[in-house]
Image (spheres, rainbow, N blue to C red):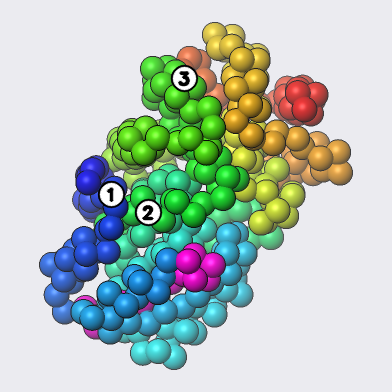
Amino acid sequence: MKQVTIQTPSKTYPVKIGEEMTNEIVMFIKKRFPKVSNVWIIADEEVFTLHGTSLAVTLKDFFKLTIYKAPKGEYAKSFRVYEEAITHGLEHKVDRHSLVLAFGGGAIGDLAGFVASTYMRGIPFIGVPTTILAHDSAVGGKVAINHPLGKNMVGQFYQPEGVFFDLNYFKTLPEKEVLSGFAEVIKHAFLSSSSFLEEIMSSFHSVNNLDKKFLIDCLVKGIEVKGDIVSKDERESNIRAFLNFGHTYGHAVESSSGYGNRTHGESVMIGMIYALYLSKIYYNLSFNLSTFITWIKSIGYDLKVPDSISFEVLYQGMQHDKKSQDGVPVFVLLRSIGEPEMVKVSKEDLIKADGFIRQIT
């Protein structure tokens, strides 16, 4: 088992990565919350069907258990589902001495964390991520639901008590979810070092041949990159915004496609290529973008932005991005690998980058 300790001004907590982690979770809850009245599992309904029964059976031996099953993916992050979850907790006598256990991918982590942060003005939660993608969202305490005008527009900063990655859950991930998760790993490499990026590009050639040691190393390094940034800027007043590399255009593509119709990670991958193109314009970034795109395509990423989604639609989405200033989109660009900067980008340059994205596919 590997462990990374996340230190923020508001809380220090462990992120543990291994196999057969249920007993670790039980011991953690018993030690950290000896008087817990109720463990409230908020789970992705499909993930719970695959893995939740055995987890619930073990937890029931030690704790009173309540289970709420949410729709899969971004459909979980709606006002309707949020209200339904709160109602479920109230109807099942979940009180202020209870603990939320977020069981699923990044969307469930966001929903469950936001429920925990607002239920009776806040109860603790722990994360049990079941996707590679969630190595990013499960760490750092950003919890939220979506608004029709933008992703993650309703939320707050609320750190978990602990995060437990059980690698056994990754074995059932479909190919598109593995690719989605590795987009965030690649993002962390761009934000940290060329050596990390080179290691990924030289080792990751097929979703079906993913070495377990390589996967663990990537998760640990990615979590360490994020943990280091979050420790310095918990509430995103400055450098934490760097973690949005690839997200400004990526979120616009994702939301314009209809939540659930395109994976978050694949959208972010498109957004990173968009930002890398802009980085060449603004900073003359020394990076072989064509080689990177060829590698990304060979692994299986779909980079196509449909003609039905116009630039103007995407531009409106970028204007709604939380980093925007006075309606002008602000992007995380790279002076070099590991050296990000926040930059206001003109509409003219955004149109150029959009044209580049559309022609590479």
Q: Earlier in the sequence, mark 3 or mark 1?
A: 1
Whether residue 112 is visible to the viewer of this picture, yes or no, is no
Magenta segment boundaries in residue numbering = 36-50
Relative to 146, 65 lies left or right: left
> Which residue is at 64% across, 34% downward?
300
Image location of residue 260, percent across then percent down: 66, 56
| Secondary element at tag 2 | helix
The residue wearing badge 1 is: 18
**Identity, as a three-letter code, of the amino acid under mark 3:** Ser
Q: Residues within 10 Å of mark 3 (few under 14, many from 20)?
A: few
Q: Which mark is residue 202?
A: 3
Q: Which residue is at a point 32% across and 66% down the rendered structure image? A: 125
- Identify the residue at the far front of this view: 209
Q: Position of residue 143 (x, y in %)?
A: 45, 58
Q: Quadrant of residue 305?
A: top right
Q: Residue reaching furthest right?
A: 308
